[in-house]
Image (tube, grey):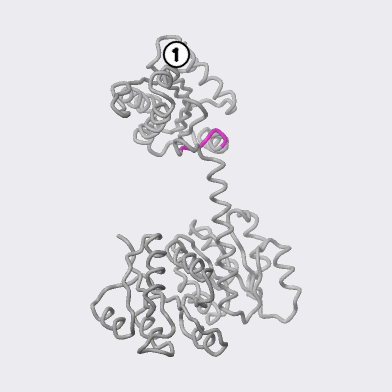
Amino acid sequence: MAERLLVVEDSKAIAKLIEQIAKSLGFDVTIAYSLAEVENILQGGKEFFAATIDYALPDAPDGEAIACVLSRGIPGVVMTGRMDDETRQKILAQAVVDYIPKENSQAFLYLKRILHWQLTNRDNGILVVDDSLAARNHVVELLKRRNFTVYSASDGEKALAVLAEHKNIKMVITDMEMPNMDGIALTNEIRKNYSRDQLAVIGISGAANGIHSARFIKNGADDFLRKPFCPEEFYCRITQNIENLNNIAQIQRAANTDYLTDLPNRRAFIQYAQKKIPEYISNKTHYCLAMLDIDFFKKINDTYGHEAGDNVLKVIALYMRRHLSGAMLARLGGEEFAILTTGVDEDQLYTRLDDLRREISVSQIPYEDQQISMTVSFGVIFNSELALAAQMNEADQALYHAKENGRNQISIAGQD
């Protein structure tokens, strides 16, 4: 269900522009052109995820609509044509998400970013660490306005426990001066287990000594704020660091994902398998490594065209996901796929693979006005203690035997 956005704006042209921006992000938009309309809409019982609020309306020339919207617990972004410091201070004294001067078209690009953050920030956990309850609650409140999932701790030792428990935490904001473990020591401990690609750390200190910022950065922090800080600067630093983490995650995903099937690629498979196989061996977990290859794939491309071939690869990936939920599945390249999965015993693992093979063998994939039939072959190695490269080679050899012996079958390494 789409989130609702209330747009409070007396200019129909601007209201229309904001509506277009919001709809492009998936919002369901309601527009109010005056304070009276705002009050009528809110009395109607509708719940709103957020609101954009024009500072000056015909019947509310001095920001009265802001208080009206915020009093209903609706996060509000203020749009204003006034640039004086008094107006700015008046806006920031209220619990607004942000304010945007209506100076030029950049204002609306920034609005789009804010609305996007409000939708996505809930997926980002932030841990606030400060021994002062008042200071901690202040930062927590600022973050909640931006719809982050927020956790808190009163010292470094408790912070490490919270961090270990909640895997969605992407940022730690820590005070410098704390009992048991101060902010510098906490940052050092965090960096033993979390790289800068995984977790951002922002140090905070109210001390007059300017050396703390350098100490935080040199000990693994990504940024620093001096108390008391301006909410605008606070939000800019938070957003910049979260965006950096998300950009890195997108780049890493692109580097480790097959563009066609959206499965992990060879690189991701090898990294995963090198980590997990020793765990399986140590824990005596039954597992298998399998290579899957589409039989006569070149013939499919030659007969139906490369777009049809691409479609077949996508469908094979879907069948694999359906039959092998929880397994590591990857496209190694061309028509070859890899599987790493665990089970109760070898028989169960074999049966799961054979069920996949059977379903593919009787399926027909529609493409334009034709039906494409296909089969797949497997090479499998069970519970091996060989190095990964050797296991993949053994599975490849078994796959070769499956092809040589007629295709559409599973060949087990060491049994040919």
Percent position of residue 346, x then y: 40, 25
User: Label 1: how many residues lie within 10 Å, few (<14), some (14-19) or many (20+)?
Assistant: many
What is the number of callouts on the image?
Answer: 1
In which quarter of the view is residue 312 placed? top left
Percent position of residue 341, x then y: 44, 33
Q: Magenta span has 191?
A: no
Dot 1 falls on a residue whose secondary structure is: helix
Magenta segment: 263-267
In the rendered image, the residue lying farthest to the left is: 44
The secondary structure that dominates the magenta segment is loop
Kind of residue indicated by mark 1: Lys
In which quarter of the view is residue 9 placed? bottom left
Report whether 33 appears left or right of 209: left
> For mark 1, what is the residue?
403
Quarter of the image that includes the N terminus: bottom left
State whether residue 373 is above or below residue 242: above
State whether residue 95 is above or below residue 358: below
Percent position of residue 93, x then y: 50, 86
Q: Toward the viewer: 291 or 75?
A: 75
State whether residue 310 is above or below residue 377: below
Report whether 271 appears left or right of 294: right
Q: Magenta span has 266?
A: yes
State whether residue 182 is above or below residue 401: below
Percent position of residue 388, x then y: 57, 28
Q: Residue at x 31, y 27 (%)?
A: 365
Q: Residue at x 47, y 75 (%)?
A: 97
Q: Toward the viewer: 394 or 35?
A: 35
Q: Toward the viewer: 174 or 63?
A: 63
Report whether 403 appears left or right of 352: right
